[in-house]
Image (spheres, rainbow, N blue to C red):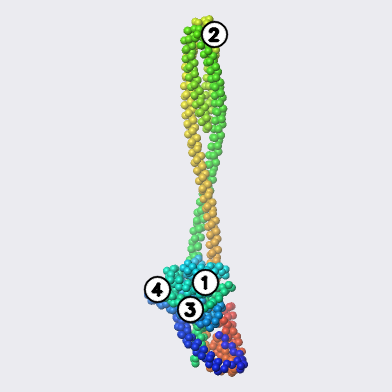
Amino acid sequence: IKEDFEIIDKKQIPSTAELKNEEKEKTEEARWSAPILSLAKKASENLALSYGNALKSSSLVGFISKPVSNDSTAKTSARHHTMEERANLMNMMKLSIKTLIQSALSLGRTLDSDFPPLQQFFVVLEHCLKHGLKAKKTFIGQNKSFFGPLELVEKLCPEASDIATSVKNLPELKTAVGRGRAWLYLALMQKKLADYLKVLLDHKHLLSEFYEPDALMMEEEGAVIVGLLVGLNVIDANLCLKGEDLDSQVGVIDFSLYLKETQDSDGQQDGGITAVLDQKHYVEELNRHLSCTVADLQNKIDCLEKTNSKLQEELAAATDRIGSLQEEQQQLKQQNELIRERSEKSVEVTKEDTKVELDTYKQSRQGLDEMYSDVWKQLKEEKKIRLELEKELELQIGMKTEMEIAMKLLEKDTHEKQDTLVALRQQLEEVKAINLQMFHKSQNAECSLQQKTEAISSFEGKANEMMSSMKQMEERLQHAEKARQAAEERCNKMKQELAGRLDTCRQQISQLDSKCSTLEKELKSEKEQRQTLQRELHQEKDATTLLKTELQQMEGLKKELRKLQDEKQHLEKVCEEQEQALQEMGLHLSQSKLKMEDIKEVNKALKGHTWLKDDEATHCKQCDKEFSISRRKHHCRNCGDIFCNTCSSNELALPSYPKPVRVCDTCHTLLLQRCSSNSS
């Protein structure tokens, strides 16, 4: 609060009636400000106690490594501490809501985001929502955010979906804290903040995932705060979210708004006490925040050390796995090359065998076709000869009876020959069918074919001999009339010759049957060889498929190696980033220590200096000039002494005041020297 005074005209001096009216208004304000002051004093005392306990706990956790005891006294003290925190937060919430409603009604217009009571209301509400939050473990460290329980409202109350979508669509918000603040702003503008929080309190089984059982939102104080928030529906707020940096706002409670000076006889004393309390509580809040930040930083350091050790173990395991995979890859490559060489050799051998079999099959087929054509021609000639003989025999039967017997014998012989010819045809057809099936004969089949050709040539010679004998028979029949006796003798000779020839033909047929059986056996053996070759081909195909699958597995292993290398690079980057974060955290810790030293010095200065009353000072402490209407009194906010305007015209930002305030010349020089030494 600035206490600058200016020279005014007599016209601007208020009259006695106006002064009386102002005194009445001040007495009315004192009536409702008295309970606020009492509540503020209680809250300050509770905060001081909680600050002392927090300092003790931070010293135990951060700076002194002592073993934690599990006694009942520690548990009872922790419970008492949480109960005090809940009571303090509830009292501060009552004060902030009351001051906000009264200041908004006195202002008589819609509230902006720059309105100080509204800002302090949101700070206190944020502290209430953060009380007892469970820390979510992430890769960087522990994270506490009150936006998680607020997201449940969208599921429980569909009317809040507009707020959630508008918060998600804001590009300026990057953290969960900023989104939670934006959500509270929008809910207050809709005048449904109390309704939404009441819906959350009705479903405490869902809130248990985010809050501890001793948290404010899980106890009766949360229901009381929701009941107090109903009174905010009277206020009209117009809050602009664009352009505001909600992510980096510091939520510090300013108690100066709730402590007002009374206009009673002891007003000056209360003003001094309130100023000192403001400074004290501000320092206590700063100390509490710093202790919390130190504890958080130490937790983060522990988490980072654990993650670093885990990452180092994973890197060692990954390197071992990479070495083993490389060895397996080399072994698989060698096996793959050996299998390839074997498969290529076997494929070449099978190709050569198939070529030889095709050549032999073609040659055998050509020879059999030629044999078949020759035999067919011989059969046709024999048919013609038979017809001629039948005609001649019919002529001779009519002339001579004796020749009939000979002719009958000859007919029998011809019938037997026909049977033999039919059998030979059947055999030829069977041989043709066998030759058609001989697609994959070996080189040994050529020898058997040559033997067959020799037998067929001998058979052709014998057939030619038969032809010559038939011609002789014709000549004998022509001369039969002249010489019967010669014919009978010749017929007997012919019978003997024919019997011998039939015997020879039967022997040849039996030989041909034996050869056919041998050929069938050879075909069976060749079929078995072909089946074995096909099996070997199938086995080789299976081997090739296995090789292909192994190649695919090798490619997959290569991909896994690449992935592991990428993960290794990523882990190295993460380690570097964590080292940088540790360095930055060390810098922040050093800065926080410097700030703690500054705060301690400020506390010492506050304890040493006292706030002088206006009645005690009649002259300026520096220039010793007497105060008058033109030369007004001004307090130095650092030492508490009273100076004139010229000796206290400087302004500096003190730890107890967020904005720059009036400071005397001596304090100004001292503070500047201290700042320069700290910066160096």
Q: Which mark is residue 302?
A: none
Q: In front: 246, or 285?
A: 246
**Relative vertical location of residue 20 with respect to residue 47 in this rendering, above or below:** below
Q: Which mark is residue 183?
A: 1
Q: Nearer the viewer, mark 3 or mark 1?
A: 3
Hey, what amino acid is under mark 4? Ser
**Residue at the left extreme, as displayed:** 72
* Residue at the disc numbered 4: 69
Which numbered disc flags the more N-terminal residue, 2 or 4? 4
Hey, what amino acid is under mark 1? Trp
Hey, what amino acid is under mark 3? Gly
Q: What residue is at 48 percent from the left and 36 percent from the top?
A: 532
Q: Nearer the viewer, mark 4 or mark 1?
A: 1
Residue 186, image x, y percentages: 53, 73
Q: In front: 359, or 592?
A: 359
Which numbered disc flags the more N-terminal residue, 4 or 1? 4
